[in-house]
Each structure stands twice: as structure tokens, then as C-alpha cells.
Image: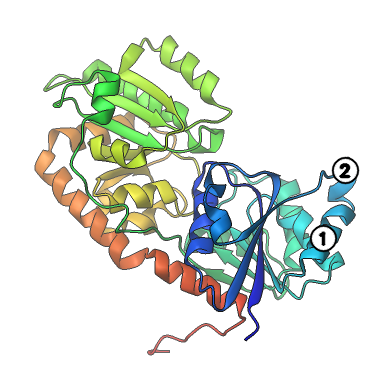
Amino acid sequence: MHRIRVLHVIQNLNYGGMERLLADIVRRVDRERFESHVLCLEYFGRFADGLAERAELHLAARQPRYSMIWPGRLAAQIRGLRPDVIHTHSGVWYKTSFAARLARVPRLIHTDHGRPSPDPWLFRMLDGLACRRTSVVAAVSEVLARQLEDTVVRGSCPIEVIPNGVDTDLFRPRPDNGVLRRELGLAPEVPIIGSIGRLESIKGYEIMIEAFAHLCKRFEAGPQPVLVLAGDGSERERLEDLIASRALGDSARLLGWRDDVHDLLSAFALFTMSSHSEGTSVSLLEAMSAGLCPVVTDVGGNRAVVGEDLVHRLVPPDNSIALAGAWSDAIHDGPRRGADAETARSRVQDCFSLEAMVRSYERLYSAEPKAEHPSQ
């Protein structure tokens, strides 16, 4: 039986939710039906470790400066790999769609993991051109699908919503093993407000630090909380300066990228995000699956992730005082926080299965029609 050769194209496989999802798809896809290849345009990175057992990994040849105008070198490399399907991920859509057309690849699928806010007109124009060469666009949330339909996707290119998924067996509630607390010198009773993600402007971490400064000034009952941010990115130095300017000292910690995500999640009292924009956050899904109460901004797909039973844990974006108040409420009401943590895990188990996500992409790769709901 002919296996469908799928070529994933991405900037790199370093830390990030999009990169983790690509690795999850490659590891879970039916190997009897699909042959997986991954082409990185920059370098491999952390999530490439062990992936060669499930896919052939390729590094793109060095691209000339004019490659956005004429990606001939990329097209030649793609032609040599002879894919039946190309699956692009945010950031590489336009260039790869052009190269795929030159290489005469019959099917191109693009997953949009989220748009900048505001979305620059140049990005919208280039991706609008790319959609004309695309078989189907997958959006990771309903909100993102509407944004794409209104501002990016033109013509007859269909849009499907395929929510991100996580492994709920791997990300499960675990007792705090004390690893993070020993590292940071924290007593068992100190509540840790935790977040994991890229330190980039779209994530709004400056709002989080301002909120924590508000919280520290007004926090009276119980042990003083600490703020722990795991991740790295271009905003790190600016955030370090902001922490220093607010005299937060060791009560706010930037850990950098970590491989011990389970140790972090088990130590957090709650999980928080202050993003300006989101698709369907993998970090949020993992934290909820691990049994953490979420306190996150009401942007993008976050409302759909937490569900109706947890909407009281949403806060307006760009509002540090509201975020600080939501943290305080969660920390001081342990029983309700615990109940919401259980609700969070159930929500992910019911609605954000990794297997369901992978099966949806398999259907797109093989160009199978979407199954109609029985009531339709």
C-alpha cells in the first residue's frame, strides 16, 4: 500500500507550543498510512531529540536574501523529497506555498497557530496570497478561524477548526516533589503563581509583572506568594529590568527554558497567562490537564479552552489590577481553587484530546471529507 508522504515545514523545532505539537503529530500519526518528513528552515532544536525514530529530519539549504520573492532553492529541495502533502506551520506559510507550487506538490495544508495583535498588513497580504495555493487552512480555535476568514483567507480556500490537544496521561496531577522549591529556597506553604511560555511581546508578561507588583503591595493574609516564569525569548532582558524597577527581588523569578515541566506544574498553586493574543495555548492545556486552576486573559481561544464552568477565571487583557485581584481570589479560596482545578482537567480530557487532533490531521492528509454531525 502506498504511504502518503507528508512533509512538515517549520522554522525550527526549538521550545514552543507549535513545535511541541508538530513533534506530537509525527509521533502519533499512523505509520502504516503516512510517511513523515520534517524540514526545518533555520535549525533543529530541542523537540528534534528522538524524533528521527519517527520521521526523516531535513535542514533547509541556506536561503538567499531574495527567497521570499523567488524561493527556487527551497523548491528544489522540496522537489527532491517528493512529498504528496506539505503541512506548513505559522511563520513559513507564504514562502513555502510559493516553493510548493514551483515544486508541483499536489496538496498543501497550513495550520495557523495564532496571529499577532495587531496583525500587520504585510503579514495579512502575504498569507492572503498563500491561501490561494493552499488546499485547506486549519485554525486552532473558532476565534482564530473567524479572524482568518475576515482578514486573511480569500477565495474558495476552506478553513477548518482543529483544536490543539495534549496527552492527558502524560500531563496528569502529580504531588509536589519539592524539586522547584528546594532550587528556589521556598517553604512548602508558599503559593507559587506559575507561567510557562515564550518571553515575547505577544505574551504580555509585562502586564503579569505589574500585576504581581500590585499583589505584593496589598497581600496581607498568609505567606507571601512568588511569581515563577519558565521560558525564554527576546523580552527577557526587558522583563528583568522591570522586575528590578519594581523592587520585586527574588519574589519574581525568570527560570529560562526548562525540561522539567512536570516538576514545575506540580509545584504551582495556579497557572496564569497575560497574553495579548492566543490561538489555543498548549501551555494552558498542559497546565489544566495537570490539574491546575487557570487564571488567564480573555483573548483568542482561551475562553473556549477553559469552558463555561471556568469563565470566572478569565480576566480582561491589559489590566494588571484585574489580574492581581483574580490571583488573590484564587490563592485565598483554596477549596474553590481545588474544585476549579478538577474542572480544568476534566475539560481537557473531554475536549482537547491529542488523539482526536492527530486523527483530524490524518483526515486532511488523505483528503477525506469531514464527517457530518448526526443532527445535520
* Mark before the other along the chain sequence, 2 or 1: 2
Q: Is residue 74 left or right of residue 14?
A: right
For the residues marked 2 and 1, what is the alpha-carbon distance in whole angstroms? 14 Å
Q: What element carries label 1?
A: helix
How many numbered marks have been drawn onto this rendered protein structure? 2
Q: In this view, does 318 lie to the left or right of 94?
A: left
232 is higher (above) or lower (below) than 27: above
- Inspect the image, locate mark 2, and give the three-letter code of the amino acid beneath it: Pro
- The residue that disc 2 covers is 64
Residue 99 is tagged as 1
Which residue is nearer to you in this view: 280 or 310? Answer: 280
The image shows residue 183 at horizontal and vertical percentages of: 29, 22
- Residue sitting at 42 percent across and 34 percent down? 258
- Residue sitting at 15 percent across and 19 percent down? 220
Q: In which quarter of the image is the C terminus?
A: bottom left
Q: Is mark 2 on a helix, strand or loop?
A: loop
